[in-house]
Image (cartoon, coloured by chain):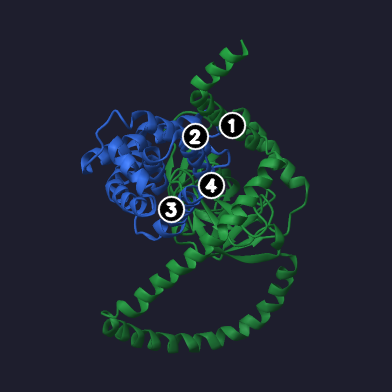
Amino acid sequence: MRIRGFFLFRRYSLLIFIILLLLFALVLMSLRAKQREGVEFFDALLMEISSPFQKASTLIIKTVQGTFQHYVFLVNLEKESRVLKQKIAELQEENHRMKEMKLANERLRQLLQFREKNSPSMIGAEVIGQDPSSWFKSVTIDKGEKDGVKKGMAVISPTGVIGQILKTAPHYATVLLVTDYNSAIDSIVQRTRAKAIVEGKGENRCKLKYLLRAEEAAVGDIVVTSGLGGNFPKGLMIGEIKKVDKKGHGVFQYAELVPSVDLTQLEEVFVIMEPLPSSQPQEEKGKKGKKTKK
Amino acid sequence: MRRILLPLLAGILFLILQTAWLPSFPIHRIRPDLLLIFTLYLAFLFPPIFGGLLAFLMGYLMDLFSGNALGFYTFSRPLVFFVAQFFKERFYLEGFSFQFLFAFVFGMLEGILIFILMNALQPFSLGNFVPLFFTFLLPQSFFTGLATPLLFWLFQKGSSLLFRQPEKKMKERV
């Protein structure tokens, strides 16, 4: 019986291996869904090993591109010189206006110092890689747990919201971009103060969900963070509404927006380090739970 | 040892190219999937167990650097590898058009599988499949197919330099 079993095993060993390997992948998926620490540790370890290669290659690629842009493509130099001369004249004029503004600036600085004391702390990070898959939208940055980066932290740039930290390794982290299908940020329409959730739409687009039909929203309106999510401070620009559709039935209207940041050209980002009060993230979790049930 | 390490390093190299080099191209939306092409090539070059493990690892690494939190590629890449292994002796794979078609079909099938998994396991809806099919999946698979003959040729040259024996075996199979 044992010998027969052994022969059966040998005969079907390949099939058993294939089934086991695919089952293992499904188990990993399930463990990731439950956010088990063992898988997260293994992910962080592998990321830590392979990210330095990624960082080095990004540096090489940027250097090569820079060389081409600065030394090889000198054909437009004369045209550029004319443009620069014109720009100098414009800057001289601007300089006079700046002197006037300097006085106003002195007064505003005092107000700014107060604001800085209350604003969350940030660290700068460099983007070292983009998502290898076209289905998902994320970037890898060169700051990780050792720098204080944690899962869920907000990532921004001077022009607006970029996304939030999805995975962390000791020296690297993955940022889920606002345009990813998994991304959801609590927001308000700046002009009308209408509340909504900004969700990723895959390409360089997001959609406004749960925007009440009774609320006013128009093309060109700016959408900012509401501060309710817990990760993002209030008032950060997310994007501009490009499409509003009230034709359908139901309580909500449909709107699409384009992010204010060009997410395909990201080089440097800021990670907001300071967590907001604990009551707010719980509120967000409650919302996500509801969404999952849907 | 060399037969284990070199394909692994090659896989990491393709992953890096895919994350660091291809995004610098003007069309960000559509990028050939170099790791899918590499996985398909592995199906010709390696035995099922070692190749399957390598495809699994490639999928795992891809998930690691992706916004994909559940790890769909860890499942889909070994599946692609085994299906390609199953069909490798049933198809004539010399020449541009056949290699293009082979990668194109696998790109489409994997895309459909990812779409089904995403819709089934993630809380959000991807929306209608038809617009996604025409604006994303079809062009993405097309470009992957276009890049395949060139990359297969490069892989063949590289593997013939590194391991002469398997190259002969592969030609016999193809």
Name the residue tied to disc 2.
B49
Mark 1, other Cα within 10 Å: few <14 / some 14–19 / many ≥20: some
Residue at (62% x, 82% y) in the render: A104
Q: Is residue A27 above or below residue A142?
A: above
Chain identifier of the residue bearing label 2 in the image: B
User: Mark 2 vs mark 4: which is more N-terminal?
Assistant: 2
- Type of the residue with mark 4: Leu
Q: Do the residues under discs 1 and 2 have CB atoms within 8 angstroms?
A: no
Q: Is residue B174 visible?
A: no
Q: Is residue A177 above or below residue A87?
A: above
Foreground mark, 2 or 4, reads 2
Chain identifier of the residue bearing label 3 in the image: B
- Type of the residue with mark 2: Ile
What is the display colour for chain A? Answer: green
Residue at (50% x, 33% y) in the render: B118
Q: Is residue B55 visible?
A: yes
Chain identifier of the residue bearing label 4 in the image: B
Name the residue tied to disc 4.
B61
- Tell me the CA gap for discs 3 and 4: 11 Å
- Tell me the CA gap for discs 2 and 4: 18 Å
Between A110 and A215, the residue placed more toward the observer is: A110
- Tell me the CA gap for discs 1 and 4: 15 Å
Mark 3, other Cα within 10 Å: few <14 / some 14–19 / many ≥20: many
The label on residue B14 is 3
